[in-house]
Image (tube, grey):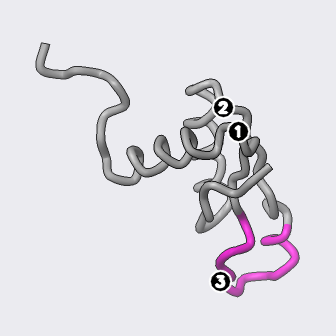
Amino acid sequence: MVPVYDAAHATDAHLIKHLLEDAGIPSYIRGEHLQGGLGELPVHGLVSVCVPESEALRARAIVVEWQEGVPGGDDLDE
């Protein structure tokens, strides 16, 4: 599994995980439980969403599309 998204926190990671799984890409959240051990201090770079290497390019494209706010295939002009 390779990381395709560095999340700000676990909720952020789950959002991306569900987005990828809706597209048929299996995903895993790495480091999700590490945040609880660090207390209230903001720590970045610990939580990431990982996918199989064979799906990494497609997953990254989906993440970028989501970050840019582009609708995921729904044509609202029809």
4 up-or-down from 52: above or below: below
Residue type for callout 1: Ser
Q: Nearer the viewer, mark 3 or mark 1?
A: 1
Mark 3 vs 2: CB contact within 8 A: no
| Segment tinted magenta in the rendering | 34-47
Rounded to the nearest angstrom, the CA distance separating label 3 from label 2 is 30 Å
9 up-or-down from 45: above or below: above
**N-terminal of the two: label 3 or label 1?**
3
Residue at image x 30%, y 22%? 74
Report x, y in % for residue 72. 37, 31
Secondary element under disc 1, as helix, strand or loop, is helix
Secondary element under disc 3, as helix, strand or loop, is loop
Hey, which quadrant is residue 32 in on the image?
Answer: bottom right
**How many other residues sit within 10 Å of disc 1, few (<14), some (14-19) or many (≥20)?**
few
Report x, y in % for residue 19. 55, 36
Rounded to the nearest angstrom, the CA distance separating label 1 from label 2 is 10 Å
- Residue position marked by numbered label 2 in the rendering: 25
Rounded to the nearest angstrom, the CA distance separating label 3 from label 1 is 33 Å
- Residue position marked by numbered label 3 in the rendering: 42
Q: Is residue 43 magenta?
A: yes
Hey, which quadrant is residue 17 in on the image?
Answer: top right
Residue 54's label in the rendered image is 1
Quarter of the rendering occupied by the C terminus: top left
**N-terminal of the two: label 3 or label 2?**
2
Report x, y in % for residue 34. 84, 70
Q: Nearer the viewer, residue 19 or 3?
A: 3
Report x, y in % for residue 49. 69, 53
